[in-house]
Amino acid sequence: NAGVTQTPKFQVLKTGQSMTLQCAQDMNHNSMYWYRQDPGMGLRLIYYSASEGTTDKGEVPNGYNVSRLNKREFSLRLESAAPSQTSVYFCASSEAGADKNIQYFGAGTRLSVL
Amino acid sequence: RKEVEQDPGPFNVPEGATVAFNCTYSNSASQSFFWYRQDCRKEPKLLMSVYSSGNEDGRFTAQLNRASQYISLLIRDSKLSDSATYLCVARESGYSTLTFGKGTMLLVSP
């Protein structure tokens, strides 16, 4: 099993450009998450999907949209990228209903917005 | 706002040393706790869950103090490979989302 796979691994955008970060998991997990990680800020939740067909805002949703395409895939879209969105983005998944809700992370996407 | 607070460090220790990290959480409704490990420029990975009775996994021991709302991680006989950032994590009962601390950096030197 590959676990959680994110693409691309690296991306450079110009201000105003759009792009979609892709995430797929092969663990049959119900819940999926998008985080961003900035120096000194820790991991902050952008959006999550508790189950297929549902999405909810996290702590820092502004400037982002998400799509839970199916049980496996959860994409994050930046419609008009801004320098403040320069960050490392992590996708994660977990088994819904599991008492401990252990999350498994992808390798991350390093995004720079110029 | 739910918060998990950690000393950012770095903690510099020699090989073989014992080191302990604490973190505090503000949400008394938090029910599940974890320690994740994150290597430089890598994704976080689960190190261990934290149980109310305390638990041990090899050289690692985790403790939970609900009354004082803090969690600890003890690493014995530190190895060079233990150098990483350790993230303290809490989950509120009934929620699927986690609250992450900003991490404590550990540097183990020869």
Image (tube, coloured by chain):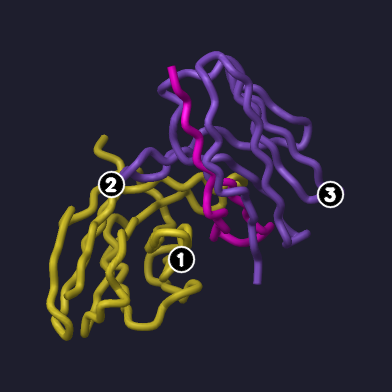
At horizontal 30% and vertical 59% (from top left) the residue drawn is: A88
For label 3, the SS is loop
Identify the chain of the residue marked 1, using the numbered disc in the image.
A
In this figure, which residue is indicated by the disc labeled 1? A45
**Which chain can be seen in purple?**
B
A43 in the magenta segment = no
Name above or below for residue A98 compared with residue A89. Answer: above
Residue B42, numbered circle: none
Q: CA distance from mark 1 to mark 3?
A: 26 Å
Instruction: Look at mark 2 in the image and give the residue it sits on.
Output: A107
Q: Observer-nearest residue: B24 or A92?
A: B24
Instruction: Give percent across and percent down for residue B10.
Output: 52, 41
Kindly report the distance in space between the C-alpha atoms of the residues bearing marks 2 and 1.
Answer: 16 Å
Marks 2 and 3 on same chain: no
Q: Among the chains, which one is yellow?
A: A
User: For the residue marked with disc 1, what is the amino acid?
Assistant: Leu
Dominant secondary-structure state across the stretch colored magenta: strand
Q: Secondary structure at mark 1?
A: strand
User: Toward which corner of the image does residue A12 lie, by quadrant?
Assistant: bottom left
Give the position of the C terminus of chain B as an image quadrant: top left
State the residue at coordinates (40%, 52%). A93
